[in-house]
Image (cartoon, rainbow, N blue to C red):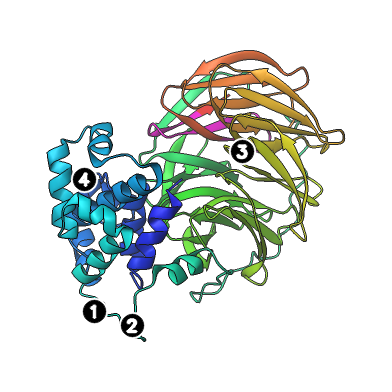
Amino acid sequence: MPPLRLTSLLQTALPDLSSASRAVVNTLGCLNGNAPSARELADWVGLRDRYQLARALRRDGLPPLEQLAGWTRVLYWMLEAETSGVSLRQLAQRENVDPAVAYRLVHRVTGVPWSQAQRAGVPLALLRLRERRGMRVVTGRSHAVDLRPGLAQAVGDDVVSSRPRWVAPRTAHPSPVRTATRQHPAAVLSDRTVVRGSPFDVAMIPGGMALVTRAHAAAVDVLRLQPLGVIGSIRTGPVPTRVVVDPSGRCAYVTSQFAEEIETLDLETLRLASTVAVQGHALAAAIAPDGHTLYVTTNIDRLFAISIPRGRIVTSVPIPMTCPHITVHPSGRRVYVPCGRAGVVVAIEAHTLCPLRRFQVGGMAQDLVVSRDGVTLYCANEGGWLNAIHLPTGRVLTLDLGSGALGLALSPDEQVLLVGLVFAGRIAVIDPRTLTLRTSLTTGGKPCRMAFDGQGGIGVIANEGGWVDCIT
């Protein structure tokens, strides 16, 4: 998740950017100025090549990528020095940068030595950046540069997009009744297909297919499950993170972090249909069982409720230390939000977004899933364990997994719980009834989000290493 203060300052100093340039600035803020190659960054933000990236920056009056990255790195150093009191030499050594190179970069960016830049503070660097962009900076009444109002606006009231209206899902047709008994996989890694661009999330769609978000490719791929393979791709905003499918199966909703919006995908045409803007980088998303409300968290530590028929935000509430995970109770009356490093899961009343209770799980709470009867809430914990919360009593049980857990998936028959051990490159196969480890599967890479098909016989795992695995 991007460092909010740095990206907010950059957005305040560089208003009215195109979506492409804003995505580049957000990416550099996320990486603290340590930019990848121009070609790689172009892929991340959904541009064709480094030449289109360079033209986008030039049209917005921004310096070339290398110089813009230098500005971002200097701003990061100044913020770090301001908050922690460390010297530039210590910051440079921590990043394996020659201190002499760091001092020269500060002088080139700000026009003054580090000692003077540090005394003047972050506003000096921001003003220099605005001047470099060709923006006239004066101290007069109508054009004075004051960063505080802009920063306050960045975390203020809700924002509704003026872009094409939200497309509500079409009326769902009754699904045919399936007589096949629900299954669960035998826990065997049966197939793998390459999906480049850091695949993160996966969601099932009708017809034996799945959607996979590609965070570093600004796209959502469509996969056929049998045999496993990519059959199409939908362009999205930069850093698509979570994807959820409407109960009708006609459309899906994607959180696009650096576009700061929720995007509607038409699954019949495989095209981007419309967007709704949110404040901050959109992270997690979950849809109510009736398909009328979409719940979204962003990195300004806030939970939003979006009315799908009306296509706008209807209410929001602050939530501390949000992460890219959220789930809705099967009844639709509760929303559960993990609070990451706070080690807490918060239960929210779905209609009013009023916080109801908190479950202390410790560590770093990540993905959540609720049993079909609504009694047990499972929580993957990056601290190295799995939590099982008995919702009526609040009792919390813990299973030690020995490595940080990120993603969860519960089979439809609730006989198998898959837990992604993201740093170990393994999938733990858990018996949810006894909360015991059955076996583990080695995937390599960084297994992230997972999902089962409708019958539960196939599990699909998105792996940031650059592929998708199939479990049968």
Determine whether label 2 and label 1 are within 8 Å by CB. yes
Mark 1 = which residue? 136
Q: Secondary structure at mark 2?
A: loop
Q: Residue at x 32, y 39 (%)?
A: 86
Q: Which residues are magenta?
A: 450-469
Q: Earlier in the sequence, mark 4 or mark 1?
A: 4
Q: CA distance from mark 3 to mark 2?
A: 41 Å
Where is residue 360 drawn, in percent x and y? 71, 34
Q: Position of residue 81 (x, y in %)?
A: 33, 45
> Is residue 382 positioned above or below 46 on the image?
above
Q: Is residue 390 magenta?
A: no
| Residue of label 3 | 342
Q: Amino acid at mark 4?
A: Ser
Image vertical order of residue 267 relative to residue 437, above or below: below
| 310 or 141: nearer the viewer | 141
Q: Which mark is residue 143?
A: 2
What residue is rendered at 63% in x and 32% in y? 409
**Which label's residue is closer to the chain start, 4 or 3?**
4
Q: If you read the primary sequence from the N terminus, does the residue marked by circle 2 or circle 1 appear first?
A: 1
- Please, what secondary structure does the residue beneath circle 1 have? loop
Residue position for label 4: 37
Residue at 63% from the left image edge and 54% from the top image edge: 249
